[in-house]
Structure formats: structure tokens, C-alpha cells
Amino acid sequence: AQSVTQLDSQVPVFEEAPVELRCNYSSSVSVYLFWYVQYPNQGLQLLLKYLSGSTLVKGINGFEAEFNKSQTSFHLRKPSVHISDTAEYFCAVILSYNTDKLIFGTGTRLQVFP
Amino acid sequence: DAGVTQSPTHLIKTRGQQVTLRCSPISGHKSVSWYQQVLGQGPQFIFQYYEKEERGRGNFPDRFSARQFPNYSSELNVNALLLGDSALYLCASSGLNTEAFFGQGTRLTVV
């Protein structure tokens, strides 16, 4: 069965420090990969996606992620975080042969302190 | 352009009641999906509809049903509500590519 694992439930970090949010997936078929952000009491907003091509993907708000097929990982990074980045971050996959549904991880709470 | 709109934003229901949640997709999008997000967890897939036909269903009981209308809007119905149905219900629409755009969600509280 396919699954997505977000290894850290919470990540505290000081403002202007770098951050990495980890995501690993398990699938016997090729997948498309996504990172979404959820601010309090809001829906999900797409940060970035990997469909094919370059394994380093740049998204909105200065975030980027790197697809590593051998390690089945898609970690999210930002070189310098802001207070406004405080939110819940979700990694998700779509199976390449079944684009009907997103499979989400359990989320990582990023808390940025001044 | 308007994004995905969901109504109502919040509602409170009693155990055993029925509820209908509504979703209007982005103009031009023919696919609508529904997700349930329980507090502290990631969203779980419930249904996907494309061109008014069910394309996929998650691991949810038959108390959950949905439909899509000719204008591509959608309704999610939940019968015989349980306390465990309390969650944020998210609707997403997508066009020709694989990117899903989410609405703000409907917060359902069952008491």
C-alpha cells in the first residue's frame, strides 16, 4: 500500500534560520509529489509540486524541495524562515496511474519564533 | 477569478442527524474531490467526481455519499452523524493537470 511519512510532527525554529521538513513515501509505482501549507482555520495552499524533470523544485514563498528517488524522499527546505511561515505543512503524493486522489502525510507543524 | 467556494463555513449538528455540504469548483474545472481532515491529522480522501460520475471512493462507510451537478458543483451528504464525523471537510477542484485547488473547508461539529 502507498503511504506518506512525515517524520517530524513539530519543528520549532528561530526567525531567519534555515529549516528542513522531511517527507518519505512508499510506493511500488511512480508518483507525483506535492507540498501543501495550511494556515489556521484555512484550506490547503499548494507550495510546490514534482511531476517530472529536474529533481530540485522551487515553489512559492522561497520554499524548495528535492526529489530523491533512491531514498523515496521529498524534503522541503527554506534557507531563511519568517514568522509568517508558521503553519502546518503537508506532504502528499498522487499515484501516476491513478490521479483521482491525493494521499497525505500527517503533517508537520512549523513554529517560527522571533 | 473566484477560487473553490464551500458552504457553510461552520455548522453544528446532533448525533443521528443528516448534513449536506456544498462546493463550487473553479470555473472550467470539471473534477471535484472531497476530503475529511480530523484534528491533528492529514486530509483523507472521500470521493472524486468527474463529469458528474464517481471516479474514486475512499475507505468511508455508506453513510457518506456525494453527487456532482451539470454545472460541476458538488454536494457531500453524511447520514446518521456520529461524534467521530466531527472534522474539517475540504473540497478540491482540478482541471486538466494534476494540481488540486482547495476551498477553505466546512468545519462540522457533531454533538
Image (spheres, grey):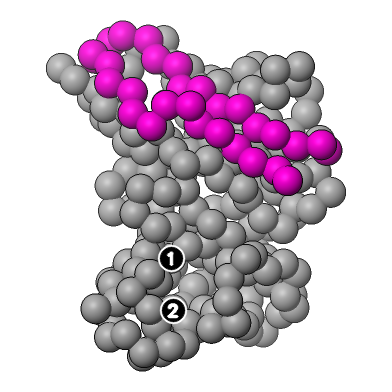
Residue with the most extreme left position: A114
Q: Quadrant of residue A80?
A: top left
Q: Amino acid at mark 1?
A: Tyr
Q: Amino acid at mark 2?
A: Leu
Q: Which residue is mark 1?
A: B89
Q: Which residue is mark 2?
A: B21
Q: Quadrant of residue A70?
A: top right
- Disc 2 and disc 1 in contact, CB within 8 angstroms: yes
The magenta region covers: A1-29
Left or right of A80 in this view: A59: right
Report crowding for label 1: few under 14, some 14 to 19, many 20 or more residues within 10 A (C-alpha): many
Q: Nearer the viewer, residue A1 or B90?
A: A1
Is residue B75 something that shows in the picture?
no
Q: Chain of mark 1?
A: B
Q: Is residue A3 magenta?
A: yes
Q: Position of residue A77 (x, y in %)?
A: 48, 17
Q: Is residue B84 magenta?
A: no
Earlier sequence position, callout 2 versus callout 1: 2
Q: Chain of mark 2?
A: B
Q: Residue at x 60, y 82 (%)?
A: B62
Q: Position of residue A82 (x, y in %)?
A: 28, 20
The tag on residue B36 is: none
Q: Quadrant of residue A108?
A: top left
Distance, label 2 to label 1, CA atoms, is 8 Å
Is residue A98 something that shows in the picture?
yes
Taking B79 as reference, is A70 above or below it? above
